[in-house]
Image (cartoon, rainbow, N blue to C red):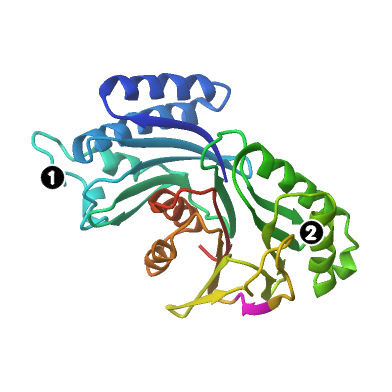
Amino acid sequence: MKLIKRYKIAKDVDLIFAKRDLGNFLKREKKELLDFFTFSTMELGTNLLKHATKGEIWLLEAEGRYYLASLDKGPGIEDTKWCVQKGNTTYKNSLGLGLYSLSKFESYELEIFSIPFKGTVCLLRPKESLKQVCFQMPYVHEKFIGDLIVRRDEYTLFADITGHGKRAWESANVIKEIFLTFPKKFLFYNDFFKFMDEEIKKYKLRSAVVCLVKNDKTSVDVMGVGNIGVFYRQNDQIYHYFLKPGILGEVFTHINIFSFDKKDSKIVLITDGIDDSIVEEVLETDVSNEILALSCIFFSQKKDDKSIFIIGER
């Protein structure tokens, strides 16, 4: 998923600007989608101002499809199913039709995730959820991020480069090229990490914690080194794993490997900008991969680049 537009909503004029700007951006889309998204922006934004006093509206894109989210750090919603029923509202003089109307669009689904006293994420997404989601958000610079997610056939490299901004981003691009040009038959071996460690030192790049993911039809293998969190949920049980201590380009000895069954399971990898406790809290609920990614990034308080990679159903 890519964050295309981000609007901070604190007053009515912010909401009017967001509606107009988003409408101009989507004017080449089908009129039905344009009308639905501009209407939804007003409804979600009005809901933010009423119940949380402020928040954000995000327009996202994945695989050629658009998503619209509202995110706030307000009081939360006690019963997310109740609030989308016709006529239900906690706001005085409201007809209770806003969220209900959004939940009735034919090709989009309204999904709500809320944590009491932390806030709420509402997401309008195509009814078929993605089976694999990558989402990133930079800490300081909107253009540059020091984390790396890059795919190569069944392999994905997931890395967190030391520091932030342009220098970390430049190092990430070199590491990306190493991954893309390394002989594929040797990728899933300890030698790959040894070679990358040597190259980082050779070219005086920023050091990095790195893991490599192999996503087959029935299983997911994760191998690597450093403080990348690995979560596995299956049969309502959540398991949290840690990669071997170390960092490529500084202190590195060897990697370790985890193998997971894909059937009825979900695998989540995070960089250290995301709070472990938030991931576990969201994983305990039955939410889509898209709203899992948004919630983990939005509610995490750590000041760092944030990246999440999810494989699994829903």
Q: Nearer the viewer, residue 258 or 86?
A: 258
Residues at discs 2 and 1 in contact (Cβ within 8 Å): no
Q: Quadrant of residue 223?
A: bottom right
Distance from Cα at disc 2 to Cα at disc 1: 49 Å
Q: Quadrant of residue 265?
A: bottom right
Residue topped by disc 1: 90
Residue topped by disc 2: 153
Q: Is residue 65 above or below residue 132?
A: above
Is disc 1 placed on a helix, strand or loop? Answer: loop
> What secondary structure prevails in the magenta region?
strand
Sequence-wise first label, 2 or 1: 1
Q: Quadrant of residue 63?
A: top right
What amino acid type should be assigned to the residue bearing mark 2? Asp
Q: Position of residue 213 (x, y in %)?
A: 70, 66
Q: Nearer the viewer, residue 135 or 190?
A: 190
Q: Which residues are magenta?
A: 257-262
- Residue 39 placement, left or right of 83: right
Q: Position of residue 123 (x, y in %)?
A: 41, 46
User: In the image, what residue occupies the spot 74% across and 55% down?
Assistant: 151
